Image (spheres, rainbow, N blue to C red):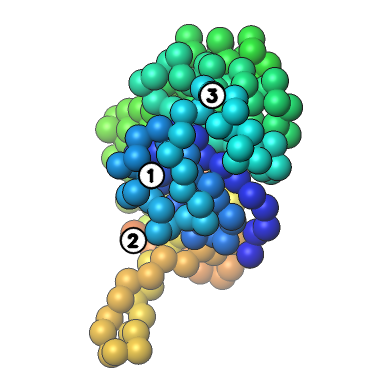
């Protein structure tokens, strides 16, 4: 299990989710918010939950914030609180600061303050949702540099029953299938049938044809992925 101490400042939906997931992975988490009600909601899920004003340097120092391996500033609508808290953390020389921005403008301001790790979760969710609306075949994707993406695509109709080599992705689409996700029926301990996903790495080495319902994890440029989907549907 991972070791380390982490502080989450701002316990809205995003901050609370990060805090709970970190704690679930075995990390020691301190959850901070000025709203006592939000602190009470999470206190049983993390190591420490504290109600304080993060723009007060004495309050932050009282919690040994500089001993944290990383601090996530997840304050949402309160822009002043976000910026003042971030400035204090920078002045206190916290070893790793991650800030959540609500807009590109906030991102630019945080960058000018000296923050190097900035999250724009709403923007990422927006991009993913737009892609999935336009292409129902796309299950998820990750944007990479140089116009590349890693996309999980529901296997198009014309690929069903074919071997991956038969598709000639590298030659025709300048693309690579780096993994394949396949759902299997399994009987649990109580005798009930469950559907579980399994990841097949290096699928070209597996002597199996593509099955209906398979999801192909493809690395390529966006335009080439779209071409692959259009030609094979």
Q: Quadrant of residue 128?
A: top left
Dot 1 and dot 2 residues touching (CB under 8 Å)? no
Q: Is residue 69 above or below residue 180?
A: above
Q: Is residue 6 above or below residue 160?
A: above
Dot 3 and dot 2 residues touching (CB under 8 Å)? no
Name which residue lies at 59% across and 51% down. Answer: 178
Dot 3 and dot 1 residues touching (CB under 8 Å)? no
User: Is residue 68 left or right of 219 when viewed as pictured?
Assistant: right
Name which residue lies at 38% across and 70% down. Answer: 196
User: Is residue 62 left or right of 32 when viewed as pictured?
Assistant: right
Tell me if residue 3 can be seen.
Answer: yes
**Measured from the top left, where is residue 59 in percent x and y?**
55, 32
Cα distance in 3D space between marks 3 and 2: 57 Å
Q: Which residue is mark 1?
A: 39
Tell me if residue 138 can be seen.
Answer: no
**Measured from the top left, where is residue 172 in percent x and y?**
56, 37
Q: Which residue is mark 2?
A: 212
Mark 2 element type: loop
User: Is residue 34 left or right of 100 when viewed as pictured?
Assistant: left
Q: Give the number of the mark in front: 1 or 2.
A: 1
Q: Give the number of the mark in front: 3 or 1.
A: 3
Cα distance in 3D space between marks 1 and 2: 46 Å
For label 3, the crowd category at 10 Å Cα-Cα, with few meaning under 14, some 14 to 19 and many 20 or more, is few
Q: Which residue is mark 3?
A: 56
Of labels 3 and 1, earlier in sequence is: 1
Which quadrant is home to the N terminus?
bottom right
**Measured from the top left, where is residue 94 in percent x and y?**
70, 31
Name which residue lies at 47% across and 67% down. Answer: 198
For label 1, the crowd category at 10 Å Cα-Cα, with few meaning under 14, some 14 to 19 and many 20 or more, is many
Q: Give the number of the mark in front: 3 or 2.
A: 3
Relative depth, front residue between 224 and 59: 59
**Measured from the top left, where is residue 119 in percent x and y?**
52, 28
């Amino acid at each position: 299990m991972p070791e380390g101490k982490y502080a989450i400042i701002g316990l809205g939906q995003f901050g609370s989710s990060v805090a709970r997931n970190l704690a679930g992975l075995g990390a020691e988490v301190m959850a901070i918010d000025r709203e006592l009600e939000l602190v009470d909601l999470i206190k049983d899920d993390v190591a420490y939950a504290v109600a304080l004003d993060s723009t007060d340097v004495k309050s932050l120092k009282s919690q040994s914030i500089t001993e944290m391996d990383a601090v996530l500033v997840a304050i949402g609508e309160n822009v002043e609180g976000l910026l003042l808290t971030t400035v204090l953390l920078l002045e206190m020389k916290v070893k790793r600061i991650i800030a959540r921005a609500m807009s590109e403008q906030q991102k630019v301001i945080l960058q000018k303050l000296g923050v190097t790790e900035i999250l724009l979760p709403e923007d990422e969710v927006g991009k993913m949702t737009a892609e999935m609306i336009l292409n129902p075949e796309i299950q998820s994707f990750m944007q990479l540099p140089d116009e590349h993406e890693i996309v999980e695509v529901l296997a198009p109709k014309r690929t069903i029953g074919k071997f991956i080599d038969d598709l000639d992705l590298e030659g025709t689409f300048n693309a690579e299938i780096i993994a394949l996700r396949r759902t299997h029926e399994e009987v649990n301990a109580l005798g009930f049938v469950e559907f579980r996903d399994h990841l097949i790495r290096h699928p070209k080495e597996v002597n199996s044809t593509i099955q209906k319902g398979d999801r192909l994890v493809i690395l390529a440029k966006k335009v080439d992925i779209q071409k692959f989907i259009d030609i094979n549907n």
